[in-house]
Image (cartoon, rainbow, N blue to C red):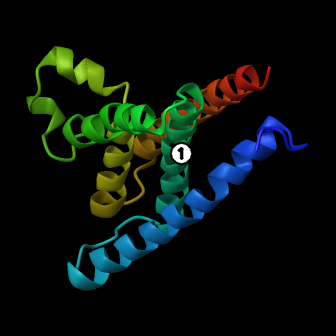
Amino acid sequence: LFVTPVRPEEILVGKTIPYFVLGMAGLGLCLLAAKLLFHVPLRGSLVVLSGVSMLYLLVALSIGLLISSAFKSQFVASQIALVVTFLPALMLSGFLFDLQSMPAAVRIVTYLFPARYYVSLLQTIFLAGDIWWVVLPNAAVLSVMAGMLLLLTRSAIEKKLA
């Protein structure tokens, strides 16, 4: 792949698009299941939910691309991705445990993980609606994270090419 006459940005886009489409299809299936099987009300806008989900998916894919471009071994990359993304997303996002019941030091650490902001957005959009003073700051943090991670990934790929 690296010997083809494509630029690093094209490699990143080519690696991101298929998983992005799969992630959005998964979101659609989850929304259908939430509505039809579990009768979860969606009080917010589907457009806002889709937009913030796209942002979160971009952050998650950027983390994966950064890890895969930084490590040569697929096994090592998969183990690091598990420790860096899945476990914190499950334990420190507010999905399983209420953030307010956590110790203050742990609560501070939760601000480093994008899943914290996405869970807050999901809870707000599903249960309360489009509360903009919650949606905008969380979406802004996800946007900044996506931009920084994409820049880091771009520089990691450039270092590999040189």
x, y percent for residue 76 = 41, 31
Q: Secondary structure at mark 1?
A: helix
Q: Residue furthest right?
A: 5
Front one among 54 and 136: 54
Q: Is residue 146 above or below residue 11?
A: above
x, y percent for residue 47 = 54, 65
Q: Quadrant of residue 122?
A: bottom left
x, y percent for residue 112 = 38, 25
Q: Is residue 3 visible?
A: yes
Q: Which residue is mark 1?
A: 61
Tell me if 51 is positioned left or right of 106 in this view. right
x, y percent for residue 6 = 87, 43
Q: Callout 1, which amino acid?
A: Leu
Q: Is residue 43 above or below residue 75?
A: below
Tell me if 6 is positioned left or right of 66 in this view. right
Front one among 162 and 92: 162
Which residue lies at the image location 52% right of the left edge and 27% below the top edge?
A: 71
Q: Is residue 140 visible?
A: no
Which residue lies at the image location 41% right of the left edge and 37% below the top edge?
A: 75
* Quarter the C terminus occupies: top right
Q: Residue furthest bottom?
A: 36
Which residue lies at the image location 13% right of the left edge and 39% below the top edge?
A: 98
Q: Quadrant of residue 144?
A: top right
Q: Is residue 34 above or below residue 131?
A: below
Q: Residue furthest top?
A: 105
Tell me if 22 is positioned left or right of 26 in this view. right
* Quarter the N terminus occupies: top right
